[in-house]
Structures are given as C-alpha cells and as structure tokens.
C-alpha cells in the first residue's frame, strides 16, 4: 500500500504521522512544494515581532526527523503539478532542478493548503509589498525589520493575521496603519465587539482606517511605497503587509476531474473523500460544512486542519470510516493586550443567513474581583429564541476569554441550551473564576430574557429608535457625570423605589446602567410598578460608548 | 407573601436577591447568625496570606447595601434555633441581646451552611488551635500572623482549604507542617495526581506528613501547642489550623420534622424542596445527587451553593418548578505554583463505587511550546470503556488547568464521549493552546486505547506486576541516564526499527517513555512486528517517578 500526501504542513503531516501509526508497513510519501515542513505557521507573526526569539522554534519537524521517527519519506521542493485519478498518479516538479516525474499511489491525500490573496491593483508587485504565510516570507520580513530601516508599515486587511502583524510590527517600534474596507476590524465578530478592538488599537497607537481600500501602489522615497486610498487620501510606508484573505492552492487540480467549489476549494464528503475514489482532502484547501448554518464554507484554521488530517488518515487506512462533522469557526487572537475569541454564529451571520437569534452582552471579570489580577472582558452570547440552543459566543478582553470560548464551543457541540449554561459546574476558586462563572451568568441573562423577566435592547436598536424612548440611566451620579447618552435622565437604582413616580409612563423606557446588571434590577422594579414597556440596554453604557464612538 | 431565608452567605443571599427580582412586593427576611453576610469565604485564606491586602475586599455586601439595592431585610447576629413546619415559623435568638422571638413565613429557605469539624481529641480546645471559616476566624488568624510571633504552624488535614492555608501561612514566612491521615493530599483526586502536589509542597519547603494523625494536643512553650501523632512522634507549633472537614449547621432542625440525612444534611428533592411543604434548602447543608454515581452525597462548594440559591428562589416564587440536577464536584485550588483541578469521577471513586472505568494520563503544555510562557501540566481523563462516555478529569500543573477542567465538565454535562473530545473545536492561537488542544489529545489517546490501537498500563498496575514485564524504555540515552525504572532496557524509539530483533518475545512488554507519546508509537511499531502483548505506561516515566517516590 502506497500513500501519497500532497502538502507537508498541518493537515498533511498530521495525516502522515497517523498513517504510520496505523500501518507500520505501508509506504508513505509526503510531497511539499516549499522548503519547510511542519512549521509553526501560527507563530510566524511573533517571530517577526521578536516575541518568539529563536527561528528554530518555528521548525517543529524536518524531513530527517520525520523519517527517523515515522519512517515517512518527505520530499521538499516538490510541487505537485497535476493529479490523475484514473491512472492514480501525480506529476511532480522538483522546484530546484526543474525535473518533472510521476509517482503512483494507492491512496492520495490532498492537503495543499492556501496562499494569501494578492489584489489585482496597479503596483501590487512593488518589492516593499509583502505577505506572511511561509518561513521564507517570515525570514524576509524579519530581516527587513531587524535592519532598522523600516519606520512605517501599512497593513492591508484587519483580519486576525493582519492585526497580529500590526501588533508585532508595532512592538518593533514601527508606526503601523491598518486599512480595512469593511466598517470594522475582524469581520468574524459583531460590530460592538470589534469596537473594543478598535479602541485598543488606537489606545496603543496603531492607526486604523476603516471603510477604506487601496486603489494603487506607487513608488515612494527610499524604496518605500505610497498607497492611494479609495477615500482619496494616500499613505506612504516603508513596508506594506497584505492580509486580505486566503485562496486554496488548487490550480493543479483544475483538470483533474476532482470536483472543486465555486472559489476553488476541494469538495469532500463527510469522510473527507473527494469526488474521486481513493483521493481524500484536508486542511485549508477544502470546503467544510458549518453545522450551524448547514452550509458549505471554507474555514482555513490550524485546529480543524490538524483534526481533518487525522480523520483522513483513518479513512485512508480504511478499517472503518470516520466522519468529519464540520467546522463552526472557533478562533482566537491576541490583539495587543486583548484576547479576541469567537465560536459558532455571530448575530451578523445569523441575520445574513436568516437564522432567528437573540443575544446578550455582559462585562464580567475573569476571576473573583477581590483576588489580585482580575481583569474584565466582554462576553456576547448568541442563542436561538426558538430552541433556546446556544448558537455562538464572542469574547473580547484582558483575560479569561479563551476559557469561556472553549466552554461555549463545547456546549454548542453538545447541543446545549442557555439553560444548560446556567448549570455548568465549573472549577471555582478565587484565582480562576467566580462562584457563578461568566458562562453561567450569560446563561442566566439569556434565560431571564427568554423567560420574559426582562426585555433587552441592543445598542444599535436603541440608536435607531433613540427618540422614541424615555432614557433612564440608573448609574450613580458620578458615573453619569463621566458620560451618558444624550437626553437620558439619571435616577440611581438604589433610589429608584422612592423616585419611581418621577418616571413617565407614556412611552417606552430604555434603562441604561454600566454593564446591564443594575438595568435588569431596575426593569424588574419598574415592571412591578406597572411600567410594561421597559428595555434594558444590553451590555450597558460600556458597550454603548465604544460601539457608538466615532 | 413573606419569605424567610436562614443563612446570609452564598446560597442564602443569592436566593434573597433573586426572590426580589422575581417579586418586587413580597417581604424577604434574611437571618444570619454571624456578624457578616455575603462575604468572600473562598478568599479568606488569601487575606491571611496578605495576597488579598484589604479586608474590605472580603465584604461584598452589608445589610445596609442589600436593603438599599434589593429592599431585603438582613438581620445579622440572629440565630435560628428551631423551625416549626406546621406553624410555619422559626424561632430566633439575637446573639447580642439574648432575646428570643418568632417569625412566621409563607416560604422558608434553609441555607445555614456548614462549620469546620473539630476532632474529639484531648487538648483540642487549646487557644492556639484555630479553624478558618468566618470573618472573625480570619481576623484572629491575620492578627496573630501580622503580630510576627508565629514562627511555625501545623495544618491538620490536606484538603483544599488545608493546603490553601498551608500555602498562605508559608507565604508569610511561617514554617508549615501538614499532617494528613490518608496516604495522599487532596483525597478528591487520584494518587498519582496528588503525588505531583506532594512534590510541589516539599519543593516549596512545606513539610508533609502522610498516613499520620493527631492523638492529642498539649501545652507547649510560649503559648504554643504540641501535637502527639499516631506515628509516635510529636510536633510543636505556635499555631494549629484544623481543616479536617465540614459538618452541616443543622442541629436546630433535629426536632423540626424536616428530614435529615445520615450525617445531618438536609434532604431535598430535585426542586430543592425539603420533606416539608414550602420549606426549601440550599448550599453546604444539603445532600445532593451526584449524577455520575447516582448516589446522594454532600459537596460543600460555593459554585453549587450559589446556583442552588437561585433555583430555590425560583421555586419559592413558584411560577414553574426548576430542577437542580446534582453536583459532580468540580473543584480547583491553587497550591503554591500549581493549579489542581478535578471534575466528575476519579479512578479511585470509580473503583470504590464499582463503576467500570478506563483512564489515560497525559503531560501536555498549556499552549504552543514555541510561544513564550508555555507551561506543562498533567491531565488525567477517566472514561467508561463500555459507553465511551467521559466520566471525569483531573489536572495538575503550572497553567491552563482550569480551562481544560471546565471544558471537560461541560462535556460530561453534555454526556459526551471520548470521541467527542477529539472533535471539540477549541480556540487556538499560540498564546492560548495548541492546534490540538490537550482535551483533544486526551480524547485521541483514550480513543486509541478503546479502539485497540494500544494497550495502556497504569503506574500502579506496572508496579504490582513489575517482574512479569520486559521493561523497554524508548527515551534518549540522556533521558534514560537521568533516571529510569530499575531493570529497564533502553532502545530509543528512533532506533527501534533497526534494533527490534533485540527485543525478546517471550513475555509481556511494558513500554516506557517520558510522557506516553513515544511509547504509543513504539507500541504500534512493535505490534506490526508481532509483539502482541505490549503495554504503554500511562503518563510515562514522568508519572512513574513522582507516583513511586518515597
């Protein structure tokens, strides 16, 4: 039995190692078009930023180490240029010698990965314009930055990689501007969550230009480049980093008869089998099912790639066929001092897909406030008002985000409801959490909304109907004086009972507090006093302030 | 409607606040026998240790603040001395004035909590002998420690509170000895996991005496105390801290007709209703169902107490009845630099309860090794070999434990299998995890065992049958030279294929590596070469070394 694996990074190498563990005697050949295999691609920005200081740390395996441990032949500089499912062979070009040859296979795994998209705009081949995807990319960037001549950088695209690069370039003393076509960074999260990121970037001195794009690049002084922007202005920088997306490396499959998707991704069934027998695919180059939208999508992430590689290997080995149950896009990134994480559906995606959803926004702390080092974060929970099922969550803040995203990702996988979230028995001691974990709290709040205990209004709903509401701010006078929604009236919650007669009952009331807790208490008191049209501002003034900031 | 709540800490105050939010107009009276309500009981050891520096931080609410926010009357120094379910009244003694009076109720919540057990041994009323449970306890201890006269302390009982106190006293420069009757600290985790804690305590200079108890206390010089131990030796200390367990504060219910359990805990149904109508109970004083053993137990923890309080309030309010689905004992503590967490069943508890279980032990790192600050921990997963369901997990190490325990607690609640663990789509970026999270890895390892890909042997099984095995250590010669199991033969995994003929095939083979990964690869290679009786040492030499240490 001879297995060929095309692609020697996450999915491919996971599969090759697993194949060997399943079958000591088969032949396994990995073909990698680059010079490196099994490298730490998620670590590359941090090597540019000198957070990871040793280049060796990025190289997890070599062909020699893999041969020794797994008896797998890994050929680098070996680009597969075509695949023939009938003949069961691939054509390979040695990128060093130019030699072209064929190798036959019994089973084939396609794990060619993706490449950064380059925009088709004038001047985009300028030598100061870079992408970051491979070890050679990283070496170039690091050498440039180490050289000290780079004073300014333009990052195009405010996705996860763009922001990681912005942070790492900024950490090297470079003035960084990020240009993003959308009205927010990190399109995979909702606007008011991204607003926290916008604030952090600006606080740290990273310039952020939203709703703007590049129309062309031209030469600038000292070998730099000037970007003309759709807004009409222009930006000069010593270095440009493009991070506007990833496309699958599947050109070589165009004529293979292996079915590809609309955007060139390899189509697979739930066993990761392509449209042709004995040919499997995994990693960034495939389309996957998003189990929450029930639609096909492409989610190029390392975690799913590694897991797919293992499943593909199991199915190539073929004792039993294992299913890959899809990818819902759980992701996280560090953006300066913020953790930014997401799992499942956002409110935005629900709206786009016509999926009914409710959401709550909280501002909890990661562990008991009385224990040193507690830090705040914002947690948004998205759920189905019909089934009460958890659909997604986003967290942005200074600690504890990854834990809650992982817990909620697990809950989504377990098809749990917001009621189940209230019951999760988490590990509590003051250094780790509170007696009611933020995940429990999110469940409580959603449960209260679903059970009709309180109505909640999102910052954008309130903004749209602002004039229709009596705006009741129940924070302390001091908090109120520090900033409030224009036109709001301040009655602190602790004085509400004696001052309830001051509140008119002829229009709907929007209740505003700092994070939403006092607003909820207020809404309950008002309901008992006959105010039947109260709406608690979700996430409170903390969310409002950042989400409505210019 | 008049609600009385007995007990003003976790469960009681949660319930009182929730009751008010459910019903603005009812009367709510909280009766607390102590002087403080809603205090941070889990933070008390850290205030003694000066990790929490401000006493105010421990006091989360006062009767005045609670009155203002929630219009709830909180009477401190008010001990309930009896309850009459027929008359629907409680008898109260004002502990300051001695005044005794009655209050009637429509609904009653019993949340009296627990108290530290004091051993019935001679001399245990010595003034240098303390417990830590309340604010006054804490004040006494802090004053003593601040005074500087305490040079040595004896902590009796190596449970979570005992070890937290040991750490905090040690942090104040006090020489601490912990005496524990069992053969391990932290009886709620398995021995080889506790062995890591033993090692940490000793490394930090905290003395640990296992399998030893106190027979009596006698006066010692300078107001100190001398403990006579069952082992025959004696120990002098300036301060003794007893932490040998907690008993429910239910003496006042003895003649009430409210059903109590064998050890005095209040018995409740799944609505937290006691045996008598309109009387509910919550918190440390109740018996709960452990859903994994299907047996009644008592688990005095803050998280469950808070959650029970909220559910009890919902049911006292009575729109619909909500169920409390039991407690599986998820817990965590910081022990010096270690995080020690547990959820669900341990192997030890499975054995005691006759529940079939398998387990795997891993030594992962909390995030990608190439990103700074990665730290190792040990993760033990316990599962059912019949249903493949996850039954429990334990984590001990220097970071990332709480996240994995919470994820696995959620998975247990979702009735997930080890196969499901392999698919959990966690949030990955190098600062937070690896592409395959330790939870995924635990699932992979368990899956491999259950699918017959490898047989695993635990350290204690190997120890019992040591002479029966050919001991094959597949680490590097350098690792082997640093320490190995006596009698083992060293063939590094990377040389195994060419040296496989050196291995005899006439007895079972135990394969030993550092953590278990190379051992697994070895077992697969050997199986392919006809060695059908290979056993991979679970957790590798790292687990063996600590678990078998004297």
Image: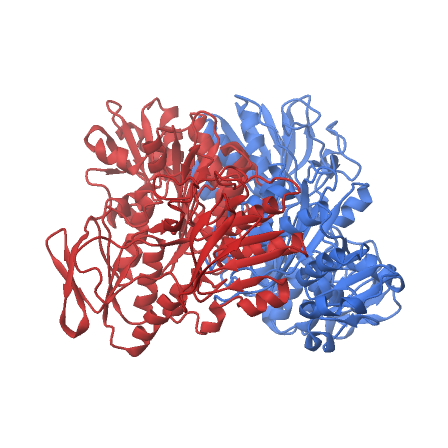
Chain colours: A blue, B red
Which quadrant is home to the C terminus of chain A?
bottom right
User: In the image shown, does B530 or B250 lie closer to the viewer?
Assistant: B250
User: In the image shown, does A260 or B12 lie closer to the viewer?
Assistant: B12
Report the residue that reaches farthest toward the left.
Answer: B232
Q: Residue A220, position in %: x, y?
A: 79, 72
- In the drawing, does residue B293 fall left or right of residue A548? left
Residue B219 can be seen, yes or no: yes
Is residue A411 shown above or below A270? below
Q: Quadrant of residue A487?
A: bottom right
Residue A181 can be seen, yes or no: no
Q: Quadrant of residue B168?
A: bottom left
Q: Quadrant of residue A139?
A: bottom right
Q: Residue A249, position in %: x, y?
A: 70, 42
Is residue B270 shown above or below B532? below
Q: Residue A334, position in %: x, y?
A: 61, 59
Q: Residue B449, position in %: x, y?
A: 42, 30
User: In the image shown, does A161 or B5 lie closer to the viewer?
Assistant: B5
- In the drawing, does residue A2 fall left or right of residue B213? right
At 18% across and 72% down in the image, what residue appears?
B223
So how many labels did they put on this image?
A: 0
Is residue B519 shown above or below B124? above
Is residue B500 shown above or below A214? above
- In the drawing, does residue A268 fall left or right of residue A14? right
At 44% across and 37% down in the image, what residue appears?
B290
């Amino acid at each position: 039995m001879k297995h060929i694996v095309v692609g020697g990074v996450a999915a491919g190498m996971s599969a090759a190692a697993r194949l060997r563990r399943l079958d000591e005697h088969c032949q396994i050949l990995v073909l990698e078009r680059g010079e490196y295999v099994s490298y730490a691609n998620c670590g590359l920005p941090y090597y540019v930023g000198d957070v990871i200081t040793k280049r060796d740390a990025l190289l997890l395996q070599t062909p020699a180490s893999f041969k020794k441990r797994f008896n797998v032949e890994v050929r680098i500089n070996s680009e597969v240029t075509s695949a023939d499912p009938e003949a069961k062979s691939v054509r390979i070009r040695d990128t060093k010698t130019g030699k072209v040859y064929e190798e036959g296979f019994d089973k084939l795994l396609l794990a060619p990965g993706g490449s950064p998209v380059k925009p088709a705009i004038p001047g985009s081949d300028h030598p100061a314009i870079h992408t970051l995807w491979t070890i050679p990319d990283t070496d170039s960037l690091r050498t440039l930055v180490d050289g000290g001549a780079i004073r300014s950088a333009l990052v195009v695209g405010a996705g996860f990689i763009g922001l990681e690069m912005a942070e790492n370039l900024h950490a090297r003393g470079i003035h960084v501007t990020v240009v993003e076509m959308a009205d927010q960074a990190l399109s995979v999260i909702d606007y008011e969550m991204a607003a926290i990121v916008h604030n952090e970037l600006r606080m740290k001195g990273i310039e952020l230009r939203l709703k703007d794009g590049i129309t062309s690049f031209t030469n600038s002084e000292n070998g730099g480049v000037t970007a003309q922007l759709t807004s009409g202005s222009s930006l000069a920088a010593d270095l440009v980093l493009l991070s506007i997306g990833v496309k699958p490396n599947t050109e070589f499959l165009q004529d293979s008869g292996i079915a590809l998707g609309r955007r060139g991704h390899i189509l697979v069934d739930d066993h990761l089998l392509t449209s042709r027998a004995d040919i499997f695919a995994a990693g960034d180059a495939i389309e996957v099912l998003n189990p929450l939208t029930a639609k096909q999508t492409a989610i190029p992430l390392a975690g799913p790639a590694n897991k797919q590689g293992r499943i593909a290997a199991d199915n190539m080995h073929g004792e039993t066929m294992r299913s890959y149950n899809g990818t819902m896009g759980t992701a996280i990134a560090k953006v300066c001092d913020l953790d930014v994480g997401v799992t499942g559906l956002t409110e935005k995606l629900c709206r786009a897909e016509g999926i009914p959803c409710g959401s709550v926004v909280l501002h909890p702390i990661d562990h008991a406030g009385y224990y040193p080092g507690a830090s705040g974060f914002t947690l948004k929970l998205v759920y189905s008002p019909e089934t009460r099922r958890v659909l997604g969550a986003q967290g942005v803040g200074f600690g504890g985000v990854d834990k809650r995203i992982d817990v909620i990702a697990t809950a989504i996988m377990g098809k749990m409801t917001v009621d189940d979230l209230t019951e999760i028995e988490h590990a509590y001691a003051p250094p780790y959490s509170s007696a009611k974990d933020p995940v429990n709290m999110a469940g409580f709040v959603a449960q209260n909304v679903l059970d009709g205990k309180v109505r909640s209004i999102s910052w954008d709903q309130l903004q749209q109907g602002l004039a229709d509401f009596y705006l009741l701010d129940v924070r302390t006078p001091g908090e109120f004086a520090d900033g409030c929604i224009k036109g709001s009236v301040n009655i602190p919650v602790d004085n509400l009972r004696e001052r309830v007669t001051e509140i008119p009952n002829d229009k709907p009331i929007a209740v505003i507090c700092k994070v939403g807790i006092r607003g909820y208490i207020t809404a309950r008191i008002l309901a008992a006093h006959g105010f039947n049209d109260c709406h608690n501002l979700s996430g409170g003034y903390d969310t409002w302030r950042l989400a409505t900031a210019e």
